[in-house]
Amino acid sequence: MSTTVSLGANKYGKAENRVVRITRDTARHEIEDLNVTSQLRGAKLIDSYLVGDNSLVVATDTQKKNLQGFIAQIQKAAETNDAPGFIRSSKDMYSELILAANNEYFQTLDLFHGLSRRFWFAHQRGPDDLRDVVNAHTARIKAIVHGDADAAKNATDKLMDHLETFARNTINRY
């Protein structure tokens, strides 16, 4: 059985921003209450859904700082061989990344991130596994924070390759 999937309209933006305008041109002031929606639309945004290329979607400075903070946390976890600390920080880091991406498709992947973290935690074998996964995640998040779409794609590919190899090696042990 074959299933065809297609994406709907590609868009990014902010919706339902309330704006109040007061016009004082005459003795009688007028108040206009507006709900404003601002969106980027177009085929170029499809990469943000398919490959995580959010170069057209700009994270706020606060979100970038938060992601850099999570990078420091997962690197510290690797230095101290703290796998549970990595899991906690990784969860928070990807929750922040999902917010920054403002991408409905990416939001649905949060469940898979959780399952992937659980699988990794149950089957990781120590400091080398922790260091390798931290390096892969760090390269990806740094590229995203710096807005380097090519580096983010390459780092994402390397992370996926690493996780696939880890999963296959784990399955082959049993």
Image (cartoon, rainbow, N blue to C red):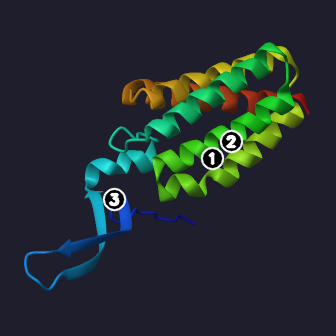
Along the line of sight, the residue nearer the viewer: 14 or 109:
14
Q: Can residue 161 be seen in this view?
A: no
Is residue 127 positioned above or below 145 on the image? above
The residue to which callout 1 is attached is 95
The residue to which callout 3 is attached is 10
Q: Residues within 10 Å of mark 1 (few under 14, many from 20)?
A: some
- At 74% from the left edge and 47% from the top edge, which residue is drawn? 114
Q: Can residue 122 be seen in this view?
A: yes
- At 56% from the left edge and 55% from the top edge, which residue is drawn? 107
Q: Which amino acid does label 3 sit on?
A: Asn
Which residue is the extreme one toward the front? 27
User: Of tags 3 and 2, which is closer to the observer?
Assistant: 2
Quarter of the rendering containing residue 37: bottom left
92 horizontally vs 32: left or right: right
Which residue is the extreme one toward the bottom? 28
Quarter of the figure that contains the N terminus? bottom right
Q: Which of marks 3 and 2 is nearer the N terminus?
A: 3
Quarter of the rendering containing residue 134: top right
- At 47% from the left edge and 47% from the top edge, which residue is drawn? 101
Along the line of sight, the residue nearer the viewer: 125 or 61:
61
Position of residue 146 measured from the top left corner of the image (x, y, whole percent):
42, 26
- At 84% from the left edge and 27% from the top edge, which residue is drawn? 83
Tell me the SS state at disc 3.
loop
Tell me the SS state at disc 1.
helix
The residue to which callout 2 is attached is 92
